[in-house]
Amino acid sequence: MTTVSVSLAQQADYRFEVDFGAGIPGLMADEPPPLGKGEGPAPAQLLCAAVGNCLSDSLLFALRKFKQAPEPIRCEVQADVGRNPEGRLRILGLHATVTLGVPANALQHLDRALAQFEEFCTVTQSVRQALPVRVTVLDVDGLLLRDQT
């Protein structure tokens, strides 16, 4: 087993400095107004970034196994935030859209990569144990390649 850790130190109110460890630039996280001042990404945005980054990495890895170059990959992740039955704000689901940097017909073995890449995404598969994550994959021309919940 491997342990991943970060340290957070309060700077003011809801603004925290996030330290990832030696050699990795930190960042400032903050809640949006009215709680914070929005001087950095909010926790929900950091979750979106983690899911999107992991999905993008997994798809890139799956395609590179077949010596394919899908770059530059882009990913947008939206979090649906709403109230749970107790009236508390919760992330109710995520939708990630990964866009390849090339047309689908420029990539060999694309179907195989698309069929397996999500299974190797550590963050997304972990988050899916708690909430739905929809993943859409498009090519550079907007061609729908995969839409999976």
Image (cartoon, rainbow, N blue to C red):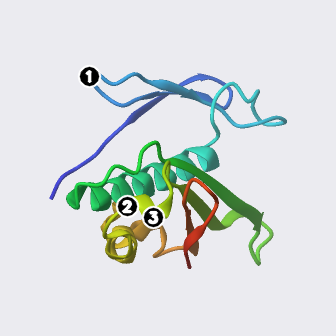
What's the CA distance linking mark 3 and mark 2? 5 Å
Q: Residue at x 69, y 24 (%)?
A: 39
Q: Amino acid at mark 1?
A: Ala
Residue at horizontal 45%, vertical 64%?
105
Q: Residue furthest left?
A: 1
Q: Name the residue rendered at 42%, 44% in the picture.
A: 71
Tell whether label 1 touches label 3 (CB within 8 Å): no
- Tell me if 42 is positioned left or right of 105 in this view: right
Q: In the image, which is nearer the foreground, mark 3 or mark 1?
A: 3
Q: Are marks 2 and 1 in contact (CB under 8 Å)?
A: no
Task: Tell me the element at label 3.
Answer: helix
Task: Read off the residue under disc 3.
Answer: 105
Query: Which disc number belongs to residue 53?
Result: none
Count the numbered circles shown. 3
As displayed, is residue 63 above or below residue 148? above
Q: Quadrant of residue 148?
A: bottom right
Neighbour class for label 3 at 10 Å: few (<14), some, many (≥20)?
few
The span from disc 3 to disc 1 (Cα, nearest Å) is 42 Å
Judging depth in this view, the residue of 55 and 14 nearest the camera is: 55
- Percent from the top left, x then y, of residue 18? 46, 29
Q: Is there CB contact under 8 Å for labels 3 and 2?
A: yes
Q: Position of residue 22 (x, y in %)?
A: 26, 22
The numbered mark at residue 107 is 2
| Horizontal side, residue 127 vs residue 92: left or right | left
Name the residue that disc number 1 marks: 22
Quadrant in which the C terminus appears: bottom right
Instruction: Find numbered disc 2 in the image and state the secondary structure of the residue it sits on.
Output: loop
- Image quarter hosting the N terminus: bottom left
Q: Residue at x 57, y 53 (%)?
A: 140
**Is any atom of residue 89 visible in this view?**
no
